[in-house]
Image: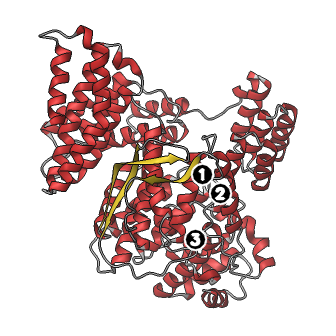
Amino acid sequence: MNHDIDALRARFEGCTTVPEVEKRIRTELSDAERLVVASVAYDHFFASNWCGIEEAALLEKDVEEGLRPQVVEALSCEGMLPYKGTRSLLLLLAAIKAIEGQNGGQVLQLKILMAWQHLLDESSSTIHRRIKELIKEVQEPCEESLVLSVERELVIAQACLLFYGYDEAHRHIDEAFKLAKLDATLTGELGKRTKWQQHLVAQLVLSVQASGEVDEAEEQMPENVQLNDDTLMDTITLEGPAKEPVLLTSMQVACLVALTTYKRKTQPKSDIVTEECMATISMILSQKRCWAGHCQSLIMRSDLEKGKGRKVERACQQLESLLLGLDGTASYAEHGVPRCKFAVACGLPPWWKVRIQYARVLCSIGLYSEALRCYEKLKNWDGVIDCYKSMGQIEKADRLIRDLIDQKDDSVPLHLLYTMLGEINQELSCVDLEPEHFEAWNNLSAAYLRLNQKKRAFDVLQEAIKLLDLKRAPTDDDYLIKLTNEALDLIEKEPNDPCLDELCKLFARIIASKSLGAQGYLLYASLKKPTPGSVDQDGRYVRLVEQALQADTMKNDYLTKVEVALRVLKTANLLIDTRLEQAGISQKEEDIKRAKSRNNLTLLPHLKKIQMAYQDQFGAQNELKMALDDVMAKIQA
């Protein structure tokens, strides 16, 4: 790799300005040479910012430092500047310029554009449009090795996740699992979680079946900080004789990491989702392959543990340990570990986002001074101001905001600074200075529409959507119900209508940021209900029905309200049927037994509670009793 960067520097020897670098790429290199330049430049840029490899420079360091403001300006997109602490920015710019107008190397182009998007605060419609075009080209059949095919599917999935394309991401992850000959199923086994536990309790574990021989040597992974607790054990101890551990290849580990990343981004936070993710992470950490997958799993585990009283200390120490390995001083040859392998496919975040997560964990345990230092190093003024507010030092926050307004710092939008100033000092005049609001753009779009200027109306509406914070927008369930019912009627007439895809995307974005009610999940499930020609969507349909049941049983309303209890029984009935139908596709007796066992494990406790809560109200023709008996009969069949 060092030889590659030396050869790359030789190509640009004598360049002292950004236009000279761009001109040399454009005029002196053939298409094949431009792809080589793009590959080498991207590899070193990515390695230094995502994998902790020492920073590389395209030109002399003092020259490159002087060009940094020009490079930042060249990499700005739609008014958004790249994160200024990014290492080796000129290498990314060279890679972007080298792929302009190229017809080959689509996966490489995809990775470069994804890296560019990661530097920006918000999604860029320009980058999104180019990525969508590349994905269409990448999906065309081609001859390549199995490892490259799996990586391609996972990279496309991560690209889709960047822009809320959850259904497309899930489809590509499923395809990667098929190519990697990997099957992963969550199941329950009796075991112990604490050191003093006397009775065995059902534990959620990941059952993995993998084909193919593992001929890869074990690698030295990032440190896995152990849980220093006098009660909780590091890993769950299962009943019975120890099973022979399943060995996975690096690409199979990457598939599991991508699946966990997808699950965390697409499902609202809940104890069940946390347990499912932790079961998968435990399996990944038991392997000694794929440095990037191991690192990403530790990052995800730390995020899941930051709200847990007994585990938050481990989360803090784990992130601190990881940051020592991402400080940009490691070499490519260190321990012989190929850190960059499958890093994009696993969704590994850049070093500054890991440091921000570390600061948030520090805040969660009250270490605001330490978190403040982290935010100041990153020049993350939002975080600095939040720390000052949490510490009760409002005057320091006020002074910082006013200094940033006077300096016209580009890292924080001016309107956001005024909003924060108004919030701190309760000054309405500051908030009134906010010049950008989605309603204004929305009204302008309506005006253009009345003038029959549809193209301009559409462009303005896109701006309104950018300004609209969908995560804080209220969800109108009645509107969703009406919209879904209209869509279901439309499916019967026109099964391939594009409105259906748009409605599915809307549901996916909503449930990624907040929990829906049971009816909302069932509506989404009705849109995703598989047809005879789309059995690959069975898994998604089953998960949505499971979430609907969870939404109704999370509170104890179903034990006091008959109508809610009836709805729970109806959903349980549907869940039994869908799980058995999904298991029957493979025509394997083992899968059907597993589905029946899962129905018994997850549904029987709720049925027993309903039976005990309403036993005094049961009569011969009682509707609730008939529904309960029906579900009980199905489980025991």
For the N terminus, which image quadrant? bottom right
Name the quarter where the C terminus is drawn.
top left
Residues under numbered marks 2 and 1 in contact, where contact means CB atoms less than 8 Å apart: yes
Q: For mark 3, does the 10 Å Cα neighbourhood hold few (<14), some (14 to 19), or many (20 or more) residues?
A: some
The residue carrying pointer 2 sits among few (fewer than 14), some (14 to 19) or many (20 or more) residues within 10 Å by Cα, namely many
Q: Is residue 27 left or right of residue 101?
A: right
Which residue is the extreme one toward the front? Answer: 198
For label 1, the residue is 302
User: Which residue position holds label 3?
Assistant: 221
Judging depth in this view, the residue of 192 and 99 nearest the camera is 192
Q: Amino acid at mark 1?
A: Ser
Q: Position of residue 350 (x, y in %)?
A: 61, 61
Q: CA distance from mark 2 to mark 3?
A: 13 Å
| Residue 318 image label | 2
Residue drawn at the location 18% of the way across and 29% of the way down: 631
Vertical placement of residue 10 versus 417, above or below: below
Dot 2 or dot 1: first in sequence order is: 1
Secondary structure at badge 1 equals helix
Mark 2 element type: helix
Q: Is residue 403 above or below residue 93?
A: above
The answer to whether residue 601 shows anywhere in this view is yes
Mark nearer the N terminus (1 vs 3) = 3
> What is the CA distance from the residue labelled 1 to the residue labelled 3?
16 Å
Classify 608 as above or below 218. Answer: above
